[in-house]
Amino acid sequence: MVEHRPYLKLLAHLVLILGVVIVAFPVYVAFIASTHKTTDFITGVMPVLPGSDFLATYKTVLFSGLAAAGAPPIGMMLGNSLIMALAISLGKIVISILSAYAIVYFRFPFRQLAFWIIFVTLMLPVEVRIVPTFKVVADLGMLNSYAGLSIPLIASATATFLFRQFFLTVPDELLESARVDGAGPLKFFKDILLPLSRTNIAALFVILFIYGWNQYLWPLIVTTDSEHYTIVMGIKRMSDVTDAEPQWNLVMAVAILAMLPPVLVVIFMQRLFVKGLVETEK
Amino acid sequence: MQTKRTIFSSKILPYWLILPQLAVTLIFFVWPAGQAVWQSFLREDAFGTSTEFVGLANYVAILHDPGYLNAMIVTVVFSIAVATVSIVVALVLAVAANSLLKSRSLYTTLLVWPYAVAPAVAGVLFWFMFNPTIGLIPYLLKGIGYHWDDRLNGTDAMILVVIAASWKQISYNFLFFLAGLQSIPKALIEAAAIDGAGPGKRFRDIVFPMLSPTTFFLLVVNVVYTMFDTFAVIHATTQGGPNQSTNILVYKVFTDGFIGLDLGSSSAQSVVLMVIVIALTFIQFRFVERNVQY
C-alpha cells in the first residue's frame, strides 16, 4: 500500500476475522450438533459446545442408516454422489472438448447451426424446463439409473466455450508443423492438443465436480428408489419427517459429510478452482 | 465465426466429434424446451386423457393469477436482497483482504470454501440454526425481545432464505472483487495518494469506479443465481411458505407442474422464465463484449 496506517491494517484484520467467523458459524453449529445425542435437542436451546457422541453419531449414519427416517446408510449415498459427480464432470469434459475441436479445427456444413444449438443450452437451466425434461427421461426408461442422473446434465455450453477459446489461442504453427510431419487429426488431438489443455481440463474438472456433487432438484425427481439416492437430496428426505422433530444430530452429521468432499476439493485445489471459476464465467 | 487459418480437411470426422454433444443437447435440452413451449398452448387434464389447444389462454391465466404475481414480487425482492447483501459483504471483505499482503491468501482460503457447499445443504444448516424451538438465533433474538418464527411469519421466512442464499454467494463475489481490485493499476492509487487523497477518498473516487464493470457483472450473475440456483434453498427450508411469502418463480414452476399437475400453466411459466434467462444472458454477453476492450 501507499502509506503506512497501522490502524487501517488492524481494521482490515478485524473485518476479515469477523467475516471468517460469520461464514464458518453455521458449519460450526452443525458440527457441534452432530456430536450430541438426539435427546439433547428435545428441550431448550441447542448446545454450543461439543458433546461426547461424535463417534457414535457418525458410525450410525455411515453404516446403519436411519431406519426410522426411511433413509439408507450414508455410505451408499456418498458412493452414488461420487458416481454422479464423476460421470457429470468427466462426461462434460469429454463431449465438450470433442465438439470444440470439431468447431475450431474443421469446416463443415451446418457448423454454424451446430454451434448455435449448443449455445442455446447456456440459457436454459434445468430448473426452467424441469417437467418436459423429466418426461423425456421417463419415456427413455432412464428413471432410477445412473444414466438418468447424469446424462441429461452433461451437455453444457460453458465447457465447450472454454475449450473453444483456448483452442483459438493455440498457435497455428503447431498444426502446420504437425501436418508437415504427417500427423492426422486424431493424432494431433491426442499428442498435441490434449497435453496442452491439461490445466484447463483440471480447472474445469474442479468446477464441474462441485456442480455435479451439489445437484439437488434433478436427483430428487429422477430417483424414487433409495438405491440411487444421492447424499445432497437424501439429507432433505431425512430432515422431512412428519409429525416429529428430525433427529438433528444425525441430520447435521449427514450435512457435514455431504459438504466435506467438495469443500476439500476447493481447499486443496484452490488455484485450479479459482482459474476454473473465473474462466467459465468469461 | 472464428476458425483456424489451417484446418483439417476431413469431411466425416467432425460430425462424429460433435455428435455426442449435439445428441445430448437435442434430446435433453432443445426437445424438452420445445415441448414446454408447445405445452404452454395446450390444456391437459391431470390424467393426460384429453388435450386441447387453447392458444395464449395459459399465459392470460397466469398473468391474472394473484399467486403468480405474488411469486414475481417475491422473486424480485429475493433477488435484489440476495444480490445486495452478498455484493456488499463481499466487497468489504475483498477490500480488506486486498490491503493485506502477507495474509491475503490465507483469508481467501478461509472465505471461499462455502462456494462448494450445496445450496440444499446450506438451506438445512440455516433451517436448523433458525429453528424457532431449539435454534440458536431465535434464542439470542428472544434476549433482545424479538420473537422469531419463520414458520408463521413471512418476513422472518424471507430473511432466513435471503441469509442462506447470500451466505453461499459471498465467496463467489469475493473472488471476483479481489481479482478486480488486483487489476487496478497501482500507479493510479499512488498518484492519488501523492495528491493528498486519503484511503476513503481513494476508494470512492478511484477504486469503486474502476470496479464498476465487475460489480455490474456480479449483479447480473447474482440475479441469475437467485432466480434459478436457489430452488434447493427454498425447497430445503420454507418450501415457499408460510402463505407463499417465499414462493419464487422457479419454485412455483416445480410445484404447479409436479405437485399441482397443471402442465399447461407450469409450461407457460417455464416459457416466461426462459425469456427472462435469455434476456439476462444477452445483457451479460453484451456487457462482456464491451468490457473486453477495456
Image: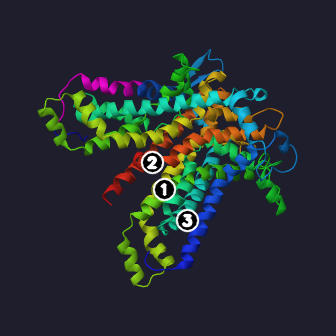
Badge 2 and badge 1 in a common chain? no
> Quick one: SS at disc 2?
helix
Q: Are marks 3 and 2 in contact (CB under 8 Å)?
A: no
Q: Which amino acid, by three-letter code, is at mark 1?
A: Leu
Say whether mark 2 and mark 3 are on the same chain. Answer: no
Query: In this figure, which residue is indicated by the disc labeled 2?
Result: A277
Query: Are discs 2 and 1 less than 8 Å apart at CB?
Result: yes
Q: Secondary structure beneath disc 1?
A: helix
**Image quadrant containing the C terminus of chain B:** bottom left
Category of crowding for the residue at label 1, using alpha-carbon neighbours closer than 10 angstroms: few (below 14), some (14–19), many (at least 20): many
In percent of width and height, residue B218 lies at: 48, 55
Which amino acid, mark 3?
Val
Query: Which image quadrant for residue A127?
Result: top right
Residue hosting label 1: B175
Tag 3 subunit: B
How many neighbours does mark 2 have within 10 angstroms: few (below 14), some (14-19), or many (20 or more)? some
Label 1 – label 3 distance at C-alpha: 12 Å
Tell me the quarter of the picture where residue A240 sits: top right
Which numbered circle lies on residue B67?
none
Q: Position of residue A271 (x, y in %)?
A: 44, 50
**Quarter of the image where the N terminus of chain B is located:** top left
Mark 3 to mark 2 CA distance (whole Å)? 21 Å
Q: Identify the colour scheme used.
A: rainbow
x 60%, y 33%: residue: A217
Among the two numbered marks 1 and 3 on one chain, the one whose residue lies closer to the N terminus: 3
